[in-house]
Image: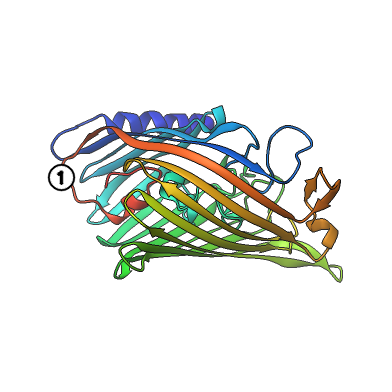
């Protein structure tokens, strides 16, 4: 797998540096997000906070993402390569290429962000919050494979891929078979609102011995109520075969989640956002947050000194629940010397994101550019 990804990366870099003429858009981009996070739960060892995939370390300065990448497109090919030095660890965030077969039909291959839409489509500087919602933390986040993409119109795009699982860790699937992912994006389905629907289905996931069929489907609807007021709504539904036993028989496990977000811009420099998220995984089919439900509420205030930098202060409340009350008590309070099911949390984050170099060939952006994350030629 690593050799395959290295080959893809080298191929894409070669593509992206060829034929940089008037018909080619090319950019080198970068982004950095740093943070300081704390909460009222105690950590027995180290600094790692549980039940979060961003702002992981408590009471210390660290980084969520440090991105550098290359993106390029012409009328006949597109390529993206991005490297993430997240928390001082090197990771290939994205390495993919698309070639036009005919008309509006493309063939694409490499390492992608997941086809399941939501907060994980973006890095923190493109989201309302630096942290990810409790429901988003159960979603697939990457996939490696190849497939076809078709632009029905400049605002409607379909992508279908045969992939490794992409389930939380694309490099530890069981390789007993392959999975399938699909995604439909529609811009301006109603004026100023975009709809994305995506699904992943297969019997591979990060638990290498598991061969149970797993599905995950997400619907993301986001846009602007007014010029200053915007919103984002994401619903998720997943299933896992043989998730638990009931009366001696294995049962289908069901997970569902919903996240609602809103943001109001007081001025070009100041905005405030709110988020409510709920996720139910009490059937225990999904590896993360096994047999638990979570309710999260949060608010933040953001200051943007320039169009490419931000400073955010966010506060949140997280409550876990379960049919077994003791199982939901996952946070330890050192002051009271007891476990509890709730946590108050606070984070301050700052970041910059910009194009280090860019040439524009005058090509019109197409919708599938918007799903080539983290950066694209727009």
Please tell me whether residue 44 is drawn above or below residue 207 in the rendered image: above
Using the rendered view, name the quadrant where residue 307 is placed. top left
Secondary structure of residue under mark 1 = loop
Tell me the quarter of the picture where residue 276 sits: bottom right
Q: Say if residue 41 shows up in the picture.
A: yes
Give me the residue at 63% from left, 36% from top: 57
How many marks overall?
Answer: 1
- Which residue is at the front of the view, 60 or 82? 60
Residue 333 on image: x %, y %:
79, 46
Decide if residue 340 is on the left or right side of residue 225. right
Task: Report x, y in % for residue 222.
Answer: 40, 63
Q: How is the image coloured?
A: rainbow
Relative to 90, say whether 49 is above or below: below
Q: Residue at x 78, y 57 (%)?
A: 328
Query: From this viewpoint, which residue is outermost toward the left?
Result: 22
Q: Residues within 10 Å of mark 1 (few under 14, many from 20)?
A: few
Q: Is residue 223 above or below residue 23?
A: below
Visible residue check, residue 117: no
Location of the N terminus by quadrant is: top right
Q: Which residue is mark 1?
A: 362
| Coordinates of residue 17 in the picture (x, y in percent) | 26, 29
Residue 3 vs residue 377: left or right? right
Looking at the image, which is closer to me, 46 or 298?
298
Q: Nearer the viewer, residue 48 or 71?
A: 48
What residue appears at the point 67 percent right and 49 percent down from the top-left corner?
Answer: 51
| Residue 70 pos. (x, y %) | 33, 34
Residue 183, quarter of the rendered image? bottom left
């Amino acid at each position: 797998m690593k050799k395959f990804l290295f080959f893809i990366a080298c191929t894409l870099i070669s593509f992206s540096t060829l034929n940089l003429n008037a018909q080619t858009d090319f950019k080198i981009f970068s982004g950095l997000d740093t943070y300081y996070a704390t909460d009222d739960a105690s950590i027995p060892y180290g600094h790692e906070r549980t039940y979060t995939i961003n702002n992981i370390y408590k009471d210390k300065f660290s980084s969520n993402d440090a991105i550098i990448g290359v993106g390029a497109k012409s009328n006949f090919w597109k390529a993206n390569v991005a490297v993430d030095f997240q928390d001082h660890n090197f990771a290939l965030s994205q390495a993919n290429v698309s070639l036009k077969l005919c008309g509006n039909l493309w063939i694409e291959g490499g390492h992608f962000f997941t086809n399941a839409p939501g907060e994980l489509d973006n890095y923190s500087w493109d989201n309302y919050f630096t942290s990810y919602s409790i429901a988003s933390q159960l979603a697939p986040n990457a996939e490696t494979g190849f497939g076809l993409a078709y632009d029905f119109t400049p605002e409607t795009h379909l992508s279908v891929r045969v992939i490794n699982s992409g389930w939380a860790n694309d490099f530890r699937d069981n390789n007993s078979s392959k999975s399938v992912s699909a995604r439909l994006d529609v811009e301006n389905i109603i004026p100023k609102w975009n709809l994305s629907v995506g699904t992943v289905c297969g019997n591979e996931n990060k638990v290498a011995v598991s061969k149970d069929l797993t599905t995950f489907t997400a619907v993301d609807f986001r846009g602007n109520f007014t010029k200053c007021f915007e919103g984002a709504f994401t619903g998720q539904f997943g299933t896992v075969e043989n998730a638990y036993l009931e009366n001696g028989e294995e049962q289908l496990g069901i997970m569902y989640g919903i996240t609602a977000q809103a943001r109001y811009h007081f001025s070009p420099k100041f905005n405030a956002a709110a988020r409510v998220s709920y996720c139910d995984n009490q059937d225990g089919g999904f590896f993360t947050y096994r047999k638990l439900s979570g309710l999260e509420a949060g608010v933040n205030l953001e200051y943007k000194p320039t169009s490419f930098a931000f400073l955010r202060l966010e506060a949140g409340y997280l409550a876990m629940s379960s049919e077994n009350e003791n199982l939901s008590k996952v946070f330890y309070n050192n002051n009271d010397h007891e476990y509890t099911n709730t946590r108050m949390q606070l984070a301050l984050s700052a970041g910059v994101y910009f194009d280090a170099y860019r040439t524009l060939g005058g090509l019109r952006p197409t919708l599938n550019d918007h799903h080539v994350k983290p950066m694209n030629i727009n």
